[in-house]
Amino acid sequence: ETGVTQTPRHLVMGMTNKKSLKCEQHLGHNAMYWYKQSAKKPLELMFVYNFKEQTENNSVPSRFSPECPNSSHLFLHLHTLQPEDSALYLCASRHDSTYEQYFGPGTRLTVT
Amino acid sequence: GESVGLHLPTLSVQEGDNSIINCAYSNSASDYFIWYKQESGKGPQFIIDIRSNMDKRQGQRVTVLLNKTVKHLSLQIAATQPGDSAVYFCAENSFGGGGNKLTFGTGTQLKVEL
């Protein structure tokens, strides 16, 4: 266990559905990240939050909407997704005194 | 743009042998490097890190070597065990407008044969 939890672990949704992914860290970290992991591709950084403020949006389509209500929680709201959005979505957190990021187990998303 | 890449997508080793996983990076300004291990169904897990002012760092059964001259990073696993079977990623840290950012390689699948 890394101290970063993600729910749900698996999600199947249609293209017209709206769903949310949740990430929670119990490590006292102040930075949180969303990554997309597709088969045979490097991890793609999506969003970065530092002290609840979004500091990076890596040209992510607007059908992905992040929310960070506090330093311990991070959400990814999904709507009108496409089949190519099917992937493993990983959350990570970091304390600003280090570079190491701690990852959650991920949410396996399938868009039908 | 800058990228981090791995030389081999798959590495098969016999149990008990040493494993060496390689990584090439292109950003000479990167100041920190990490190796992660990702087992099936899990998120990446930190293995070992190294700062750019070092050329070698050892952990428990693992050693990371950094060659800044040729921008090369390697992970050595001693006495490889079945539990070492996983995908291994290298990542480099750089500093940009959004703060520190890790850039990841594609990953190498390590398979340990009994």
Image: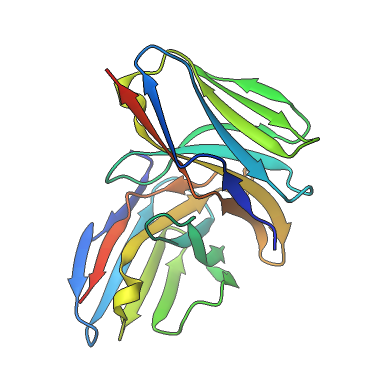
Q: Quadrant of the C terminus of chain B?
A: top left
Left/right of residue A50 with respect to residue B42 in the rendered view: right
Q: How is the image coloured?
A: rainbow
Rendered position, B96 above or below B81: below
Rendered position, A87 above or below B44: below
Residue placed most toward the observer, A5 or B93: B93
Q: What number of labels is visible?
A: 0
Residue placed most toward the observer, B49 or A111: A111
**Residue B95: percent from the left, percent from the top?**
72, 56
Left/right of residue A30 with respect to residue B40 in the rendered view: right
Left/right of residue B99 with respect to residue A44 in the rendered view: right
**Residue B42: percent from the left, percent from the top?**
31, 44
**Residue B1: percent from the left, percent from the top?**
70, 63
Residue placed most toward the observer, A91 or A3: A91
Query: Based on the displayed image, in which of its 4 quarters is residue A41 positioned?
Result: bottom left
Q: Which residue lies at the image location 20% right of the left edge and 77% below the top edge?
A: A112
Q: Which residue lies at the image location 42% right of the left edge and 79% below the top edge?
A: A65
**Residue A57: percent from the left, percent from the top?**
56, 74
Q: Which residue lies at the image location 19% right of the left edge and 81% below the top edge?
A: A14
